Structure formats: C-alpha cells, structure tokens
Amino acid sequence: MGWLKRGWSTDAAPAATTFNFRPLNVNDFDAVRALSNSSFPIRYPDVWLGSLCVNKNNDYRTVGCFTTNGTLVGFVVVVPDHYNYEVVHHPTEFEMTLANEVDNKVAYVSSIAVDRNFQRMGIGSELLRLAMAICLSDAKEPRLMYLHVHHANVAAQRMYERMGFVNRHTNTRYYYIDHQEQAAYIFVKYLTMWRTDKMPFWMRCDIRHLKENDLDAVKKLSNEELPVQYSDAWFHRICENDADEYLAIGCFNQHLYGFIAIDREYYKNELKRKPNRCSAFEKELSVEAKEQMSYVVSVAVCKEFQNMGIATELMRMAIELLKEETKPNVIYLHVLVDNEPALKLYSKFGFVNRHTNDQYLIVRPEEFRAAHIFVKKLDV
C-alpha cells in the first residue's frame, strides 16, 4: 500500500497542517488503544487491538492518519473477507442475506475513529475512501462493504450517506452500553469491483440504487434501448423515489450501463387504483398472490455492454432485495415474444411463461406488439 497519501490536507484543517496515511503496525499499539478508548463508549480488548497492529494472519486492512510529527489522529480497520472471518461462524439472518447477494464477498468496517480535536476536517471521509480503495485492489475481491453505526450517531450516519452507503437494517440489540442494549444501523455500499469474465479486463461496475442526479442518464438509456417511451414523471419517480414505491438500481462505471426498475407493490400502487388497466389474467394473478405483487417495469442495458452479464446481475440483486425488503409472493413482467435474450434471462431466474397478450405494447401509434407474461413465485 505504498500509494497511501503523504502530505494530505483539506481546507477544513488549520493552515499548513498536513497528514500522512499508512498501515498500522505493532509500534502503534499504545496510540491505537488510547484513541479507541477516547472515541468509543465501549472498551475493546487489548488482544483485539493488538491483533490489528500485528495482523499476523493478514485478516485486516488498516490505515492510520498521522500528523507530520507522528501523532495518530485517526484510523480505520476493514476485514476484506468478513464472511469467512466472522459471518460463517456467527451468522445473523441479515448478514447472511448480504453475503448471498455478492457470493459471500463482503468486507466489513470493524472500526473507524478520529481524534475529537481533528474531527470535521474530512479525515473520517478520507480514511473510509482509502479503505474502499484498498478493498477494490484486494485479492479477496469484496463486492460489498458494510458497517454498524450507533442509532444516535447522526454525524457518522451522514458521512456514510455522503460516501454512498445506504441504511439497510436495524439491529435493536447490537450494542451493550451502560448496562443497556442499544440499537445499531447497518449501512451498506456496493463496491465498484463487480465484473464478469465476459467484460473487458479493465471494466468494473458499481451496482447501486438510482439517485436523483441519475435522471438524465436513465432517461437517455431508456429512450435508446427500449421500444416504449416513458413519461418524464415516471423517470422522476424511479430516480427520486421519495415514497419508496420502486426498487430501482443501476450498473455504473462513471457512466450508466444498465438499470432495472420494479414497482414494489404493483397491485396497491397501480392495479387497484386503475382497475381498467388490470387484465383478466392480472386479476387472477392478484388473487393467487394475495395481492402481494411486484412488477418489473423496465430493464435496460446499453447496447455496447450487452451480453456481459449486466442484466443478469441487476435481476439477481433486485430479486434478493425484494425478498429481503418487500417480500412479495409474486414477481411478474411483460416481455416481447421475439426478445430471445430476455426470454432466456427470465427463464434462468425461474420465471415461467403464464400468459400471452397479443396486443400489449404500442410502439408507434396504432401498432401493437405481442408480449408474454412471465411470473416468478417467491418463497419468502
């Protein structure tokens, strides 16, 4: 990790103040223990703090932030293979779900601390950024990073959100402080390490939830690759998603390569409110699903990046997130009868062709296209 920064500074630091970053070593133990004890409401065992500095089994990736005179003012500790290090031995349901989303390639931020006198200078953000960069180049190839944060630590939560982490879960009994059980949030970020063997060697992708500033890219990709044109209002809804109606995730590497948008509760959001749009088959399906239905509204991948596994990964992750968060009984979608790649993709995920609508899609005025309705039942 010789590329770690020296002479780093920010506008928030006092004039002429610079910091150096390097891995922790055995000589840092006393400073790590002192900073840990002053930063956290719980005392970590000396044996664990020592193991971070010695790192005998290469379980950890550590970065310390030091002043130019060698004083430790911050550190971060990441376990790049947390599944084999911890999850498989002491599994929780949610952490197993996370591991399953990325083939067990999960990294975990065990600890991050900044001296109180040096907070609000961007050190915590830089430590976390370096930790992510280290994971991206690690031989373990983690594809997801997560951490626990105390439910009342709003400042830390905001920092994690700025860094692209998403609050995915609450563990109501994670901390034990002052003889009381206290809650922690689990914040999760997908790392830009995902790739398949079909991709160019340089290509890495980040799969994450769509955001408001993705609007133009989503609209452009949809208009270029899909036979139907959606309204501007719909694009705003999936990107802003204020009411959490949609599960909308995209595949990025500077640019948007593909996205999937799913109406989480399609019966309640659409079919029940607009019964005239509900076909006879959808009425039957809603009864079968006890009205717990999610609908895949759109899947699109940029033409030059098709056949690389992007749609497969988007669909796989979307299904896992739906099973965890929304828990529908059924997911269904329409697919044009002549779209062979899509038919194969959905069949691979266990979708079954249940119905054909001969006049489903209007691609131009007065021109209809036939579509199959593919249905997947979920065991949630």
Image (cartoon, rainbow, N blue to C red):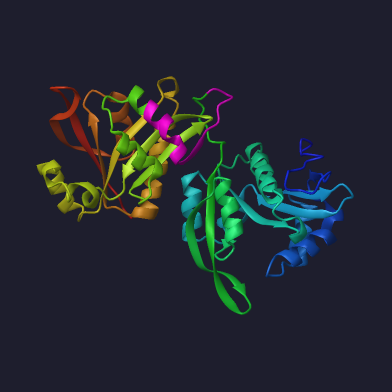
The range drawn in magenta is: 200-220
**Residue situated furthest bottom in the rendering:** 179
Q: Position of residue 189 (x, y in %)?
A: 54, 46
Quadrant position of residue 239: top left
Q: Is residue 60 visible?
A: no
Closest to the observer, 96 or 251: 251
Q: Residue at x 17, y 50 (%)?
A: 273
Q: Position of residue 319 (x, y in %)?
A: 37, 45
Q: Quadrant of the N terminus?
A: top right
Q: Magenta stretch: residue 210 in it?
A: yes
Q: Residue at x 78, y 49 (%)?
A: 65
Closest to the observer, 201 or 103: 201
Q: Magenta stretch: residue 378 in it?
A: no
Q: How many marks?
A: 0
39 is higher (above) or lower (below) than 303: below
**Residue situated furthest right in the rendering:** 69
Q: Residue at x 65, y 56 (%)?
A: 110
Closest to the observer, 119 or 294: 119
Left or right: 232 with respect to 181? left
Q: Quadrant of the C terminus?
A: bottom left
Q: Position of residue 271 (x, y in %)?
A: 18, 47
Left or right: 111 with respect to 30? left
Q: Position of residue 7 (x, y in %)?
A: 82, 40
Closest to the observer, 15 or 18: 15
Q: Is residue 36 visible?
A: yes
**Residue situated furthest top in the rendering:** 304
Q: Residue at x 79, y 36 (%)?
A: 2
